[in-house]
Image (cartoon, rainbow, N blue to C red):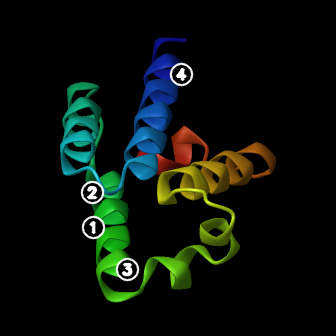
Amino acid sequence: MYHRRIQHAALKTYRVAIQHLTNPSVCAACVAFTEMLGLDSTPLRVDVQAADRLLAHAGLEDLLGDDVKEGNTMEDAIGNFVTLSSVGTKQLQPTNLFD
């Protein structure tokens, strides 16, 4: 039970970091919190760094497509993607992210 709650907190932390990719302070806090949970923050740090490089290289419209046209922010689009992806798949379950 205790391990499951830590994994759930880690997944929520991961989602917050991904939703706030453009805010380095939030991402750093999420990495620190993941470490405080006693988990390896490497997957989170790698994903944040990769997304940062993609954003630096490609234009926002190239990455988000129709979401920009609809007036959504990057955080909205990524948050929707993370939420939709985690609903129907096992890929974003916390046990796979941090084990």
CB under 8 Å between discs 1 and 2: yes
Which residue appears at 65% of the width and 56% of the height?
81
- Residue 58 visible at all: yes
Say left or right for 77 vs 99: right
Q: Earlier in the sequence, mark 3 or mark 2?
A: 2
**Horizontal side, residue 62 vs residue 44: left or right:** right
Which one is closest to the eye, mark 2 or mark 4? 2
Q: In the rendering, which numbered label is found on residue 4?
A: 4
Of 33 and 55, the residue lying toward us: 55
Distance, label 2 to label 4, CA atoms, is: 22 Å
Distance Cα–Cα, label 4 vs label 1: 27 Å
Q: Earlier in the sequence, mark 3 or mark 1?
A: 1
Residue 99 visible (yes or no)? no
What percent of the width, then of the height, locates residue 92? 60, 50
Q: In which quarter of the view is residue 78 placed?
A: bottom right
**Mark 4, secondary structure of its residue:** helix
Q: Position of residue 28 (x, y in %)?
A: 19, 44
Q: Are marks 2 and 4 in contact (CB under 8 Å)?
A: no
Mark 2 lies on residue: 45
Name the residue: 48% across, 29% down: 7
| Image quarter of residue 10 | top left
> How dense is the environment of label 1, judged by Cα within 10 Å: few (below 14), some, or many (20 and up)?
some
Q: Is residue 91 above or below residue 49?
A: above
- Which residue does the numbered mark 1 point to in the structure image? 49
Q: Relative to 97, is 79 on the left or the right?
A: right
Q: Amino acid at mark 3?
A: Leu
Secondary structure state at the residue bearing disc 2:
helix
- Amino acid at circle 2: Arg
Image quadrant containing the C terminus: top left
Q: Mark 3 or mark 1, which is nearer to you?
A: 3
Q: CA distance from mark 3 to mark 2?
A: 14 Å
